[in-house]
Amino acid sequence: MSILLDLKHLRHISLPTRPFICKCLLVVIGLVVLRAIISPFLAISSSEKSFYGSRALDLFPGVRKNKFVEVPQIIWGLNNQKIAFARACLTAKFLNRSLLMPSLSASLFYKEVDLLQPITFDKVFDFNKFNARCHGFVRLARYSEVSDHTEPFKLQKGSGRRWTVDRDLDQLQQSRLGEADDSEVIHVTGKHPFLWPDHWPVKDYAKIFDCLALAPEIETEVVKVISKIKDAGRKARQEAAISHNKKRIDGSTNLSVQYIAVHMRIEKDWMIHCKKWEQRSNSKEICSSKGEIIHKVSQITDLRRPVVVYLAVADSLLEDDSVTSGWRVGMIAYEKKKLGVTDIYDRQPYLIKSAIDFEVCSRADVFVGNSFSTFSNLVVLSRTERLYNLGKASSCGEDVGLSSYAYNIIGDDGGPQRWMTDMSDTSLQRISYGTNNVSCH
């Protein structure tokens, strides 16, 4: 329908009325132009309709709330479980489905599956905060949302060398159509998600991890540990001031207390594992002794001294308890026992202990870890994501805050290598299995 107005007729309209009609005309023309601009983006092709399903979405784009993906219990260490969870979320996103809240594993067993202690996701992470933060990207659902309790569609993950990344992706493509897509629930069987072929870029994983917030009761424990670390740092400052005959400043008026967190991989099981790893890979940049770590950390000058160095270490696997000795002047090392927080950790299962340590390291002013550790890699990924959100894509040659270092790699200045995650990586391979190819951007 034409919306053109014969402008010659305006001269027959009284002067007070003309401005009003002109304004209306401009509004109408503006709406027509706007519709012409945005209509291509609102149009949905027939193929897209078959994928999304017109009755499935509340809003476009989004994640269907009445179609679900179910995955096996997620196992192994904390950070392997986080990677597995994120991979399950991204698989559900690819299928345009909500992920049914998975069961994690509170205990650490690699082979004795019957000894695994299942723990629901919402006992570790905040379910509502996750969905709020990841709104429009991925979605978690509760089993109570499933209305049709008939047999789900079973999606068997392949295995072996013949099951390539391309074959796996083709299987997922087929599952977006036909019988699989018609089913309310797709139940994935076979390998657990950490071992699924990886199709997603690092930035997508980073977004999932950024949506994870600890359950309130665990967050409370994290705050307690960090408070203890800062109390120790405040005490060290006051003692240093007294020893130099300076006026003692009350802690409430002091500058903010900062700390370094070191993920110290010197446990006996790690040392055996990494020595074999070095032999296989013909590399000397995987293992580090206690002395080597202390030497590297002492060369970091980001924070003024005295400064507390929190040692994130599996105390029960240490061959001796001397990790806090031998540190340079001005670096006061603490582990859980010396810090007086063993009661916080001892009452928690393995998974919660690791989650607390992860957050203590992630929130440190400076973090130092091993680039072949999944724990260290995910801490650095978390910190890199925060720097990117602040508009900082490099930490080379300047103190940008949230500095991270790899103590197993020698940097240009002879100290530990500055470390940021490569957010342009097309898969999580290097983060999952480690690398000595790290840099400050």
Image: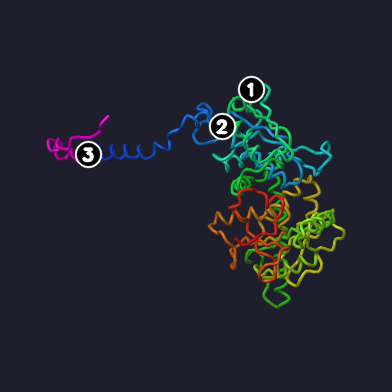
* Image: 237 above or below 273: below
Q: Label 2: which residue?
A: 64
Magenta span covers which residues?
1-23
Quote the CA–CA distance across marks 2 and 3. 46 Å
In the picture of the structure, the residue carrying the numbered disc 1 is 148
Residue occupying image coordinates x 65% and y 37%: 167
Indicate left or right for 424 with 157 as reference.
Answer: left
Magenta stretch containing residue 22, yes or no?
yes
Q: Which residue is mark 3?
A: 20
Of badges 2 and 3, the one in the foreground is 2
Q: CA distance from mark 3 to mark 1?
A: 57 Å
At numbered mark 3, what does the secondary structure look like: helix, strand or loop?
helix
Tell me whether circle 1 and circle 2 mark residues in contact (CB < 8 Å).
Answer: no
Whichever of callouts 2 and 3 sits on the residue coming sooner in the sequence is 3
Rendering coords of residue 416 (x, y %): 70, 66
Type of amino acid under label 3? Phe
User: Toward the viewer: 130 or 39?
Assistant: 39
